[in-house]
Image (tube, rainbow, N blue to C red):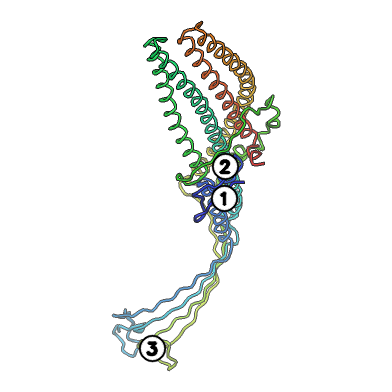
């Protein structure tokens, strides 16, 4: 088990070997992509709570204090005040007005609200599926990057061995040239071959660093962390694709389930649009307490302020009649979205089947290629050994030796690349069958 020195919640210094299983578990815990997907789950729960609130009573409170700088007056017939034939301006308020109100409203019947509750719950399930898919994707990325790193390191080992052999050969040929037993062109040719190999190693070393950084990026690990990747036997392969995964069941795949859930959500959206045709019934009640006075001491119990109470109960019925066909257009758009989602499902189903079939075929081809490359590598080794003996005995030229050595390096790298192709196909097959998490076992 790999151990890390933690700062905050991330490892910045590795103190043990990082196995593939360790890398995958680390990614599930610290990958920013997975973290973001899990936050979407929390957001989905909050949206469900918000939708549910529309079906619950809504209670609001309000209050106000008004200072009537100029009080509005209303003309009244003078007969009322004992002044017949005249109109008298009378103020119907006082300088200060205070009011406090509590209002309660409750949806009695609103089909849009009920549909929204179903959609919100389905939305939670959607985010759960999306998070599961994000986890599977990050596992695939981390596993592929991990094996790519291993293969690059194997290629570097082959190149290091080749450089070591060339350096020894260079010393021998240089000594032979000094003693008049070798030609200047042989010294130059071995130097050119050595320089080319050293340049290749430098490029490969740079590629290895970039692959390490990519692996750490996928894992959510700080780039400055030092990795210790243990030696792994890449040549442990299965003999057939069927040994890696069960028969494909599309309905078990997160990609398919996610699209099905999206289709369901779009169906709820269509139902919500249709619900706009249905009448809505709601209940409202309120209580109002108002005070009037000419002094700003409204809350003193000295009789200078007059207080009045008011309350009402209301049942509201809203019946849609005609809106210029706006509702019909919204329903049509929602139905088209559902049809498009169904096409996406059919297309994705074919894509998933194709990915699975391609991965199986790639594995089968890779197994054959590995066996052939293994035999080819053995023959290249025999040719190189024989050519080296002939060269030492003066029966082969330096050109023959260098060609045999290049063929051996090529055969070794081709074998390693075939192993990588197999591993990548293996990961793709596990992913396409929904079994990528088996890598965690």
Identity of the residue furthest to the bottom in this view: 302
Question: Can you tell which of label 1 and label 2 is closer to the viewer?
Answer: 2
Quadrant of the rendered image containing residue 422:
top right
What's the distance in space between the residues labelled 1 and 2, CA to CA?
56 Å
Identity of the residue furthest to the front in this view: 179
Q: Which residue is mark 3?
A: 297
The location of residue 26, given as percent across then percent down, is 56, 46
What's the distance in space between the residues labelled 1 and 3, CA to CA?
52 Å
Secondary structure beneath dot 1 equals helix
Residue drawn at the location 38% of the way across and 79% of the way down: 65
Q: Give 145 or 376, whichever is nearer the viewer.
A: 376
Residue drawn at the location 55% of the way across and 24% of the way down: 417
Question: Can you tell which of label 1 and label 3 is closer to the viewer?
Answer: 3
Q: Which residue is mark 2?
A: 18
Q: Is residue 31 above or below residue 279?
A: above
Quadrant of the rendered image containing residue 366:
top right
Of the residues under marks 1 and 3, which one precedes in the sequence?
1
């Amino acid at each position: 088990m790999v151990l890390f020195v933690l700062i905050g919640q991330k490892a910045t210094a590795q103190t043990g070997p990082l196995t593939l299983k360790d890398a995958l578990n680390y990614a599930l815990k610290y990958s920013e992509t997975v973290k973001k997907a899990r936050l979407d789950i929390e957001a989905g729960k909050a949206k469900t709570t918000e939708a549910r609130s529309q079906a619950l009573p809504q209670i609001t409170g309000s209050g106000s204090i008004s200072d009537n700088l100029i009080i509005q007056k209303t003309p009244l017939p003078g007969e009322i005040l004992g002044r017949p034939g005249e109109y008298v301006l009378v103020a119907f308020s006082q300088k200060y007005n205070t009011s406090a109100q509590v209002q309660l409203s409750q949806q009695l019947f609103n089909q849009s609200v009920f549909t929204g509750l179903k959609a919100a719950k389905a939305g939670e399930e959607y985010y759960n599926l999306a998070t599961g898919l994000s986890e599977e994707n990050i596992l695939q990325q981390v596993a592929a990057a991990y094996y790519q790193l291993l293969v690059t390191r194997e290629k570097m080992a082959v190149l290091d061995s080749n450089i070591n052999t060339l350096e020894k050969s260079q010393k021998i040929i240089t000594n032979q040239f000094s003693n008049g037993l070798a030609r200047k062109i042989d010294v130059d040719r071995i130097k050119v071959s050595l320089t080319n190999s050293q340049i290749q190693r430098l490029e490969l070393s740079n590629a290895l660093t970039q692959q390490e950084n990519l692996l750490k990026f996928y894992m959510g690990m700080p780039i400055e962390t030092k990795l210790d990747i243990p030696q792994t036997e890449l040549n442990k392969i299965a003999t057939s694709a069927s040994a890696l995964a069960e028969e494909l069941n599309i309905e078990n795949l997160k990609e398919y389930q996610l699209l099905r859930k999206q289709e369901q959500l779009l169906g709820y959206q269509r139902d919500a649009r249709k619900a706009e045709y249905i009448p809505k019934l709601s209940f409202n009640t309120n209580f109002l307490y108002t005070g009037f006075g000419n002094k700003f001491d409204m809350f003193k119990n000295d009789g200078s302020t007059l207080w009045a109470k008011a309350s009402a109960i209301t049942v509201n019925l809203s019946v849609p009649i005609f809106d210029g066909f706006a509702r019909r257009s919204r329903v049509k758009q929602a139905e088209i979205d559902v049809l498009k989602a169904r096409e996406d499902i059919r297309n994705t189903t074919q894509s998933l089947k194709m990915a699975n079939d391609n991965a199986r075929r790639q594995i089968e081809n890779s197994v054959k290629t590995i066996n052939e490359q293994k035999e080819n590598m053995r023959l290249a080794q025999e040719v190189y050994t024989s050519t080296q003996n002939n060269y030492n005995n003066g029966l082969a030229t330096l050109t023959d030796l260098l060609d045999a050595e290049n063929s051996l390096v090529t055969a070794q790298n081709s074998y390693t690349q075939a192993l990588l192709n197999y591993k990548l196909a293996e990961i793709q097959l596990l992913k396409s069958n929904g079994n990528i998490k088996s890598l965690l076992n």
